[in-house]
Each structure stands twice: as structure tokens, then as C-alpha cells.
Amino acid sequence: MGNRLSKIYTRTGDDGLTGLGDGSRVAKDSARVDAYGTVDELNSCIGVVLAETIPDDVREALVSIQHQLFDLGSELCIPGHSAIDDADVSALEQRLDALNADLPALKEFILPAGGRAASACHVARTVCRRAERCVVSLARDEDVRPEAIRYLNRLSDLLFVMARVLARFEGGGEVLWRHERRRA
């Protein structure tokens, strides 16, 4: 493949513009840059989960997801490019069903807590929801394949289930929301 980044700084973005994968230049705060930037942030959040001690099946799934998120980022960075397909969405659904099968039914809302790995997974889940919102916003004005939105929607569900699995794995369990109002 050769050297892709021989020089890290180029100064080409000093004017507030950045290059897309097709060579076009857009504002750094454009909806497209916001969308793929938030997908990149999500990928980094998953890296934080992977820095913890987690079950092998969850680790394997998250590493695979990191690669897919890089693919999704490329799809969003190159207008007209496709990298995520229905099979990727189906794979997330299969993992979700497999992990959820051993969990008790939810009868209460849970708080984003439960140990370091579980909490990091909840952060990844919320960033995933934000990435989904960014991609939906982008789709209002530009062509975005529906698979990208479905992928992020399903991934946030999977990250929620993974957070539940990790809370149990870490031994802390889930923290249930107390819905009664406390008055001081």
C-alpha cells in the first residue's frame, strides 16, 4: 500500500475547509464532516471499551464493528461510495439476539453505569445515537444510503445489550432508575 501519510500536517485545513475522499473541499463544520467525524468518535469510544477486560465474544464483535465503522466513515467521506450493506445490519442483529438471549427481561429503565467497561459501552451507545442523528441530518440534504442509518440504529441497540452483558461480567450489575421523585 505504500506510505499514506508521509507528512502529518499539510496546512490545507487552516482556512476552515477539509478534503473529502473524492477530492472535493467542504467546510469543516459541514453536515457530512460532522457525520463521519462522529462515526470516528464512536470508533474511538469503542476502543476505550476494548481497553478494558471484557468477554472474548464481546471483544471479537467490537473489533469487527471497529472495522465496519471505518468502512462507514469512508462511505460518508466519499459521496456516492458504498461500504455498508444489509448483511452488515443482519450481522449486528444476529449478535444482538445472541447476547440478549441470556439476559433477563427489562422491567425498569437502567442508568448508564455498572462498572468501567459497561459505562464506557454506554458512552459508545450515546455517541452512536448522536452519529445516527448526524447521518439523518445529512440525509435531509444529500444522498445517504439507508443502510448507513439502519447500521447505526442497530449498533446502538447492540451497544445497549453489550453494556448490560458487561455490567454482569464486571460483577456490579445494572443500576436501575428510581422513578420516584426525591425532594430535598
Image (tube, grey):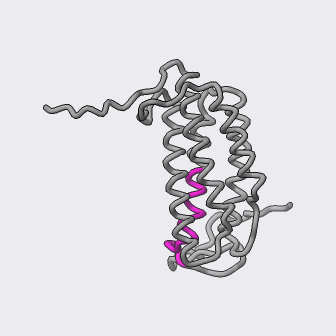
In depth, the one of 23 and 147 nearer the eye is 147
Q: Position of residue 29 (x, y in %)?
A: 49, 72
Q: As displayed, is residue 32 above or below residue 166?
A: below
Left/right placement of residue 178 relative to residue 49 reads left
Main secondary structure along the magenta-highlighted residues: helix
User: Depth check: 131 or 24 in front?
Assistant: 131
Q: Residue at x 51, y 61 (%)?
A: 133
The reply to whether the magenta stretch includes residue 30 is: yes
Q: Quadrant of the N terminus?
A: bottom right
In-front residue for pair 172/105: 105
Residue closer to the observer: 4 or 125? 125
Residue furthest out toward the left: 184
Q: Quadrant of residue 147?
A: bottom right
Position of 53 with respect to 123 (left or right) is right
The answer to whether 88 appears left or right of 49 in the picture is right
Spot occupied by residue 106 in the image (x, y as percentages of width and height)? 49, 31
Instruction: Name the residue at 52% across, 32% down.
Output: 118
Tell me where residue 83 appears, x and y as whole percent: 76, 62
Compared with residue 173, is residue 161 higher up or lower down, i.e. above or below?
below
- The C terminus lies in quadrant: top left
Magenta region: which residues? 27-42
Looking at the picture, how far across and down is residue 128, in whole percent?
55, 51
State left or right for residue 105 relative to residue 146: left
Say above or below: 64 vs 31.
Answer: above
* In the image, residue 53 above or below residue 150: above
Residue drawn at x 49%, y 43% as measured from the top left: 123
